[in-house]
Amino acid sequence: MRTIRVGLSIGFSVGELADIFRERNAGGAPCHRVRKLAAEKLALYCTSRVGSFGGSAPCDQHQAHHYEERNEERDRVSAGMTY
C-alpha cells in the first residue's frame, strides 16, 4: 500500500501503477519504464512551476541529464559493471 500511495502522490495514475505491478509480477523489471515516467512527471511539474520562480524553471536539462547519469551509474554498480 505504501508504494501505491507514494506513486499516486508523485503523479502516477492508478492505471500506470497497475501496468508496472503487472509487469513486475510477470517477472519483468520495469525500472527503465518507471524512470522514464517519473522523468516525464518531473518535467511537467517543473514546467508548471516556471511562473512561480520568476520565469526560470528549477529543473532544467542539466539536472535531468545529471539524474540520468546517476541512475545509469547505479545500474552499472548493481550489475557489477563498474569501470
Image: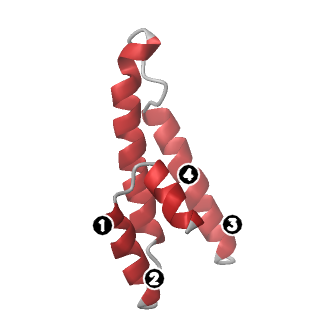
According to the picture, the residue beneath numbered tag 1 turns out to be: 15
> In this image, 6 relative to 11: left or right?
right
The foreground one among 74 and 48 is 48
Residue drawn 36% across the image and 73% down it: 18
Q: CA distance from mark 4 to mark 3?
A: 14 Å
Judging by the rendered image, the residue that carries numbered circle 4 is 69
Judge the density around disc 1: few (<14), some (14-19), many (≥20) Cα neighbours within 10 Å.
few
Comparing marks 1 and 2, which lies closer to the viewer? 1
* Labels 4 and 1: the sequence-earlier one: 1
Identify the element where label 1 is drawn.
Answer: helix
Q: Earlier in the sequence, mark 3 or mark 2?
A: 2
Could you tell me the amino acid type at mark 4? Glu
Q: Which residue is mark 3?
A: 83
Image x and y of residue 63, in percent: 52, 36
Is disc 3 in contact with disc 2, using a CB cutoff of under 8 Å? Answer: no
Amino acid type, callout 2: Arg
Q: Is residue 80 left or right of residue 24?
A: right
Residue 81 lies left or right of residue 6; in this view the side is right
Q: Quadrant of residue 74?
A: bottom right
